Image: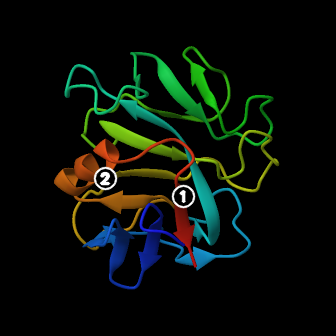
Amino acid sequence: MTSDDMVLTPLGVRFRNRLYPCTIGRGGLSKAKREGDGATPRGTHRIVGMLYRPDRMIRPTGWAVPIRPGDLWSDDPAAKDYNSMVRAPYPFSHEALRRADPLYDLVILTDWNWPSAVPGRGSAIFIHQWRRPGYPTEGCIGLRRTDLHAIARNLRPHMRLIVP
């Protein structure tokens, strides 16, 4: 592990020698993640992308990609593009990336079950804004808005999220 790694600890995410409070999935931590279990998967996950809402914030880094109206994330294990960003209209189960609430105003993408998704192993594990302290996610890592933005400014592709 290096100081460039984000490491989940019992007290939060440690990154660059700072500790940031966070929330994890309602299903706790899991070595055997599966679709819909609400668990945060244990392991080493590479950072592979960053999405942001250009109507709500400035671009956090040069490699961040804007979330456009109609951008979705496929979470249907039966779909050929399972666990990837897709566009509306989309006939399979999915999650809207452009939300009314601020949860996905800034999303850091990990390589969990990507790019070659195994059906049922679980779709994306994002690092995103939390709803409130202590409120669990659906398996992602949730951070306070200001902390998420501070981390995002210092990330580069292929840095790692380590969930022991």
In which quadrant is the C terminus drawn?
Answer: bottom right
Q: Nearer the viewer, residue 156 or 123?
A: 156
2 sits left or right of 149 in the view: right
Disc 2/disc 1 C-alpha distance (Å): 12 Å
Q: Dividing the image into 4 quarters, which one contains the N terminus? A: bottom right
Q: Residue at x 67, y 39 (%)?
A: 83
Q: Residue at x 78, y 44 (%)?
A: 117
Q: What is the tally of numbered marks visible in this picture?
A: 2
Of the numbered discs in the image, which one, if any, rests on residue 160? 1
Whole-percent x, y for residue 59 in the image = 28, 26
Question: Taking 7 as reference, is 76 left or right?
Answer: right
Circle number at residue 40: none
| Mark 2 vs 1, N-terminal side | 2
Q: Looking at the image, which residue is at 70% across and 39% down?
A: 76
Q: Amino acid at mark 2?
A: Ile
Where residue 96 appears, as percent x and y from the top left, is 46, 31
- Badge 1 density bin: few <14, some 14–19, many ≥20, Cα 10 Å: many
- Residue at the spot x=46%, y=71% of the render? 7
Q: In the picture shown, does residue 79 fall above or below 108? A: above
The label shown at residue 151 is: 2
Judge from the rendering whether residue 64 lies leftward or rightward of residue 58; answer left or right.
right
Tags 2 and 1 touching, CB below 8 Å: no
Q: Secondary structure at mark 2?
A: helix
**Depicted 72 relative to depicted 109: above or below:** above
* Residue closest to the far bottom: 10
What amino acid does circle 1 point to? Arg
Instruction: Give the image location of residue 126, x and y in percent.
Output: 48, 50
Residue toward you, 85 or 11: 11
